[in-house]
Amino acid sequence: MTTRQRRNSRRRKLLLPLGAVAVMAYFGYHSFNGDYGIWSRDRMNREAIGLEAELQSLKAQRLALQERSRLLRPESLDPDMIDERARSNLNVLKPDELVIDLAASQSVASQ
């Protein structure tokens, strides 16, 4: 019976360490650049801070709109609010009145 013996080569000795280095490099790269890597986590944290600020702004707008709509409810009608809305919708003025449209002046100032 014959046995087959292989020669010890440098390539064979380096195969396992090079494979281990390749696997470590793969996981190392993806620990920084992957979908849930370190840099992605930092980017998501910055995005979350921006979204929290936007959420606070939207909550403030919602509260302002709720307060404004509360004034128009039948159980708590505010005469000034009714007068303002009627004049705005009907486009009616008294002869001695002067109207300054704040929405128009703000849009001109922002341009």
Image (cartoon, grey):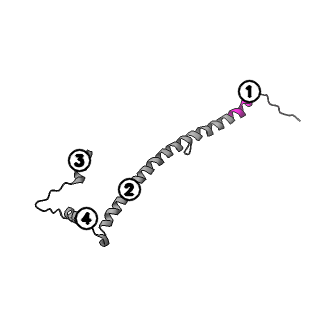
Task: Name the residue that disc number 3 marks.
Answer: 108
Report which residue position mark 2 lands on.
60
Q: Are marks 1 and 3 in contact (CB under 8 Å)?
A: no
Q: Residue furthest left?
A: 95
How far apart, in angstroms, are the residues tagged by discs 3 and 2? 24 Å
Q: Amino acid at mark 2?
A: Ala
The amino acid beneath tag 3 is Val
Taking 42 as reference, is 55 left or right? left
In the rendering, at what x and y percent does residue 52 appear?
Answer: 45, 51
Residue 4 percent across, percent down from the top left: 83, 33
- Which circle, 1 or 3, is nearer the viewer? 3
Disc on the earlier residue, 3 or 4: 4
Q: Is residue 93 above or below residue 74?
A: above
In screen coordinates, is 47 left or right of 71?
Answer: right
Instruction: Estimate how packed mark 2 is, as few (under 14), some (14 to 19) or many (20 or more) residues with alpha carbons within 10 Å.
Output: few
What is the quadrant of the C terminus in the image?
A: top left
Q: Earlier in the sequence, mark 3 or mark 2?
A: 2
For mark 1, what is the residue? Answer: 10
Q: Which picture quadrant has residue 68? A: bottom left
Q: Secondary structure at mark 1?
A: helix
Q: What SS does tag 2 mark?
A: helix
The segment highlighted magenta reads 3-18
